[in-house]
């Protein structure tokens, strides 16, 4: 290699300026660089006056391609045949034919001539690439004018997939120089009237499936079951509930909590079990419910859905006078169940067996309080959208009913009894615990006091090692009463059922994978539900531009107040222009809404 020789450096042309020891000094398009000789490839010995004198020549390579079929021509051979002379520009032009065109491939030192089949394939690919580039250019032109054709569907669908979280990057957002976020994709879709304001992207964005599982469901196996139909038990739920998976009853001596016997049909590692594990829990969003298990499972097992009797997994709990558990009797059962709404049950609380059940459970509640249970009474609402999202949006406050507290207490009692039973019989189950708060809540009255209590509570944990659930005031606790709706409950039931029937009880290490998976997926379901609820509340406000509502200040800093809107169960933060007291009431109005960001700015209506 001599001075003024044309070489390749990192696939770009360079001139050799001189040598300095073992290094070569190159003149590049921008500046100079010292490199080792092995880092460059000689194209032509030159001399070439400057890189500016280098040209890419016009020529027809077809004759050379045909002449050298089956051979390995040199760079010089091709330069002379195609361009008539072996010059630096001819050498560079031959190099630009390698691998970039359909004619030749390989390297400068090992040039190959493509076969007719290879050439045709390469030409077709190049043509398709050119056509795709033209289609994209045409789309970009329409994109800037926001005038779309039917042929643009794939690009618009990409933005929709971005908003739903199916993909992480969109070429359309890149072209528009938008940050690659689902929120920005959502904003574009609404701007283009691609989706309506009510369109809910959050279930898929958080990894939730949008339809019920479609799997074969076996029939209930023939098993010995204790007949408990001599007394009536009650499945008490919100109006419109379609998956009653628990019921409570009293036989004169024991409190019975009956649970839909999901493990009778959903055995460990079966297709039904794996599908439930992959979902984690039912998804409850205002416009619909997406179930963890096929609806046919609930149809067979739901409490009170069968005409004469329901198959139950029943806890017969004998209570001491102080509300502690004296004995637990677990049975596969047949139970007689009557379905009631909370409102209906509340009207019967002075009747038997409700009066006795409530009294015994009140002892349990008091025992939990003595053990440090934290009861937080914040306003709650139920959201429902008619016609699968197309109809009216209903936001209904949930009243604090004695019947609701009775059912909640019975479910906690069953979870405590199941955990104690599992520990005493060495059965691995997913235990739920909650650390004791590190700080004491502010001593405040009213809703501000309830907010302060909630603020210091730590997240609950699911592990295979039992420990105290401080929020419930229980030494041990597991979830078992919702096996049709939550996978962790189903796992606990599978283990307890295997034990009482003499089946295979899985070891701790076998339980770990399911426990870890269901906790992660349950968290995704919770996030999707919360985001969906926010989405529908914001739509409710969008459709009521003149909305005004009462709010109560539950927390504050020097310049910011947290206000609770009871009728919406929303907690906006609002700048304080003047000092205000805890629990003060104000009227709020909507100042601005960003639906895609799920952000509402409220202002005090002075």
Image: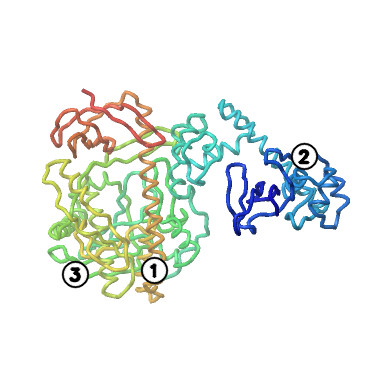
On residue 326, the disc is: 3
On residue 57, the disc is: 2
Residue drawn at x 26%, y 63% as measured from the top left: 477
On residue 511, the disc is: 1
Query: Quick one: SS at disc 2?
Result: loop
- Crowding at mark 1 (Cα within 10 Å: few <14, some 14-19, many 20+): some
Query: Quick one: SS at disc 3?
Result: strand
Residue 449 is left or right of residue 385, and the answer is left
Q: State which quadrant residue 486 falls in.
A: bottom left
Quadrant containing the N terminus in the rendered view: bottom right
Of tags 3 and 1, which is closer to the observer? 1
* Residue 371 appears in view: yes
Of tags 2 and 3, which is closer to the observer? 2
Q: Earlier in the sequence, mark 3 or mark 1?
A: 3
Between the C-alphas of marks 2 and 3, the distance is 96 Å
Instruction: Where is residue 418? Give x, y as percent.
Output: 28, 66
Query: Quick one: SS at disc 1?
Result: helix
Q: Is residue 518 above or below residue 119?
A: below
Q: State which quadrant residue 110 falls in.
A: bottom right
Residue 29 is left or right of residue 528, and the answer is right
Foreground pick, 281 / 96: 96
Residue drawn at x 37%, y 34% as measured from the top left: 393
Instruction: Where is residue 144? Give x, y as percent.
Output: 56, 28
- Crowding at mark 2 (Cα within 10 Å: few <14, some 14-19, many 20+): some
Q: Is residue 574 above or below residue 474?
A: above
* Residue 258 appears in view: no
């Amino acid at each position: 290699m001599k001075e003024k020789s044309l070489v390749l450096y990192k696939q770009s042309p360079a001139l050799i300026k001189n040598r300095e020891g073992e290094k070569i000094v190159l003149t590049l398009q921008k500046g100079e660089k010292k490199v080792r000789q092995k880092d460059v490839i000689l194209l032509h010995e030159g001399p070439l006056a400057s890189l500016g004198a280098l040209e890419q020549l016009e020529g027809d390579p077809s004759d050379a391609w045909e002449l050298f079929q089956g051979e390995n021509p040199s760079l010089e051979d091709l330069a002379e045949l195609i361009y008539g002379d072996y010059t630096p520009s001819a050498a560079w032009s031959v190099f630009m034919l390698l691998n970039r065109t359909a004619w030749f491939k390989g390297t400068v030192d090992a040039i190959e001539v493509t076969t007719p089949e290879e050439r045709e394939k390469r030409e077709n690919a190049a043509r398709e690439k050119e056509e795709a580039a033209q289609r994209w250019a045409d789309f970009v032109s329409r994109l800037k004018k926001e005038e779309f054709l039917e042929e643009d569907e794939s690009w618009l669908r990409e933005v929709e997939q971005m908003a739903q979280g199916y993909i992480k990057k969109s070429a359309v957002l890149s072209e528009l120089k938008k940050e690659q976020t689902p929120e920005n994709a959502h904003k574009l879709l609404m701007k283009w009237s691609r989706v309506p304001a009510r369109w809910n992207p959050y279930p898929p964005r958080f990894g939730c499936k949008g339809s019920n599982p479609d799997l074969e469901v076996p029939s209930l196996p023939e098993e010995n079951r204790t007949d408990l139909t001599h007394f009536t038990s009650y499945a008490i739920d919100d109006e419109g509930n379609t998956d009653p998976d628990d019921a409570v009853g009293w036989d004169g001596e024991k409190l019975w909590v009956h649970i839909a016997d999901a493990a009778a049909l959903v055995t460990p590692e079966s297709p039904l079990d794996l599908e439930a594990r992959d979902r984690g829990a039912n998804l409850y969003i205002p416009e619909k419910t997406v179930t963890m298990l096929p609806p046919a499972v609930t149809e067979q097992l739901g409490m009170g859905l069968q005409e004469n009797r329901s198959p139950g997994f029943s806890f017969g709990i004998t209570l001491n006078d102080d509300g502690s558990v004296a004995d637990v009797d677990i049975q596969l059962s047949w139970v007689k169940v009557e379905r009631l709404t909370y409102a209906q049950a509340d009207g019967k609380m002075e009747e038997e067996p409700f009066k006795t059940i409530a009294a015994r459970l009140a002892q349990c509640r008091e025992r939990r309080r003595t053990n440090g249970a934290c009861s937080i009474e914040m306003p709650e609402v139920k959201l429902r959208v008619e016609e699968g999202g197309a109809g009216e949006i209903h936001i209904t406050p949930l009243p604090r009913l004695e019947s609701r507290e009775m059912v909640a207490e019975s479910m906690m009692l069953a979870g405590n009894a199941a955990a104690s039973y599992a520990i005493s019989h060495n059965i691995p189950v997913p235990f739920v615990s909650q650390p004791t708060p590190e700080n004491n809540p502010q001593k405040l009255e009213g809703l501000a006091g309830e907010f302060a209590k909630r603020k210091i509570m730590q997240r609950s944990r699911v592990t295979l090692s039992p420990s105290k659930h401080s929020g419930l005031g229980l030494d041990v606790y597991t979830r078992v009463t919702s096996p049709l709706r939550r996978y962790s409950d189903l796992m606990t039931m599978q283990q307890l059922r295997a034990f009482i029937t003499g089946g295979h009880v899985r070891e701790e290490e076998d339980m770990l994978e399911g426990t870890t998976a269901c906790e992660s997926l349950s968290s995704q379901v919770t996030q999707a539900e919360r985001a969906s609820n926010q989405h529908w509340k914001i739509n409710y406000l969008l459709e009521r531009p003149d909305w005004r509502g009462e709010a109560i200040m539950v927390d504050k800093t020097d310049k910011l107040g947290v206000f609770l809107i009871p009728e919406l169960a929303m907690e906006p933060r609002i700048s304080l222009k003047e000092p205000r007291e805890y629990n003060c009431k104000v009227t709020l109005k909507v100042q601005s809404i960003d639906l895609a960001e799920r952000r509402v700015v409220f202002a005090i209506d002075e």
